[in-house]
Amino acid sequence: MLYRHSEVFRSLMMMADLGLVAIAWLLAYWVRFDTGFEVPKGRPPPADYVLALGVILPLWFVLLRRNRLYDTRRLGSFLDEAWDIARTSLSSIVLLLALSFFIRTYSFSRAAVMIFGVAAPVLLVSLRWLVRKALRSARGRGYNLRFAVVLGAGRLAEEVIKRIREQADSGLQILGVLADGPPGRKVASVEVIGQYMDLKPLLARQRVDYVIVALSGQETQWTDKILAELEDEVVSVMIAPDLMRIATLNSAVENLDGLPVIHLRSSPLVGWSSVRKRSFDVLGSALGLVVVSPLWLLVTAGILISSGRPVFYGQKRMGLDGHVFRM
């Protein structure tokens, strides 16, 4: 039922977005050609720009879905959503300009395209701000709420509860915590209402929309059992991986062709780090040569007098990417 309601809402948002895109395109035409700007090449027929919507609307439909703007964002931030809309707009402008470049028979006004590139994201972001404001008001009155149960009692579970509370307008309420040990104690001020084995009976007697699995590294043996218990349930399941114990490492999340992977250690000699190190090496060594050159002249003379040639000692060393060089 919740999924069907969500589908209806997403469909309405999709139609509203495409309607605003069409308004932004026609508004750009009006601003460019009907508000007093010079039109050296003459005013093009409005029908040409109306027909262009047959390309623009499908393009935006694909880009908006590709940027996941119709995924559930109950726990997402407004800034992230606005950024996704801006990226969509930029992609559409680039594609439209490229299309007008290759189709020589007809080209749209670049000024109109740029006006559209500003108006469309402004309208779409404004719509989402209004929707979020309306949802926040409704949730404050007890409507459109979702209920969650957190599994785990360690630092990870505490962090999950903290993050949910920081997004008060999400409408997500925590019913309680399930964890090993006796009930009654609290995790981040949320009461432990049972153990992991009590999950199935809880789902049977009470409405739960989200099960958030936030088990510590010592409790991973429960993960498979919990997921098996949830196979025939309609509840949404989210797993928070226990990364806090490796957070002190130089870790980062990367995307491997759609698969998120955790990069625990990376070489510091890449990107700007490599540029900074190389700059420091060159400038530092140059300054060092200038400062100690008088002393080195004396040392060189002493070596020549006492031992003769060679003055310099050479040795093989391994440098960047395993490259062997003579130092």
Image (spheres, grey):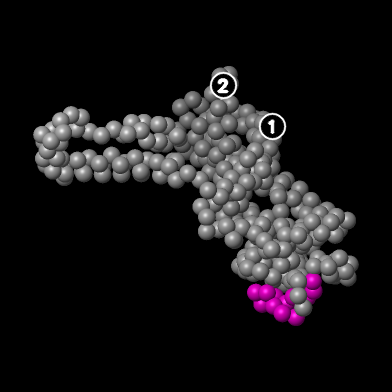
- Quarter residue 226 falls in: bottom right
Q: Is residue 319 magenta?
A: no
Q: Is 11 on the left or on the right of 111, as rendered?
A: right
Tag 1 or tag 2, which sits nearer the N-term?
Answer: 1
Highlighted magenta segment, given as a residue range: 184-195
Residue mark closest to the camera, 2 vs 1: 2
- In this view, the residue in front, 107 or 157, is 157
For the residue carrying disc 1, how many other residues have a C-alpha within 10 Å: few (<14), some (14-19), or many (20+)? few
Image coords of residue 263 (percent x, y): 57, 47
Location of the C terminus by quadrant is top left
Q: Which residue is mark 2?
A: 102
Label 2 element class: helix
Determine the residue positioned at 66% across, 69% down: 154
Determine the residue positioned at 73% across, 57% down: 238
On residue 54, the disc is 1
Residue reaching furthest front? 306
Determine the residue positioned at 16% across, 33% down: 307
Label 2 vs label 1: CA separation? 18 Å
Q: Is 88 on the left or on the right of 199, as rendered?
A: left
Amino acid type indicated by mark 1: Gly
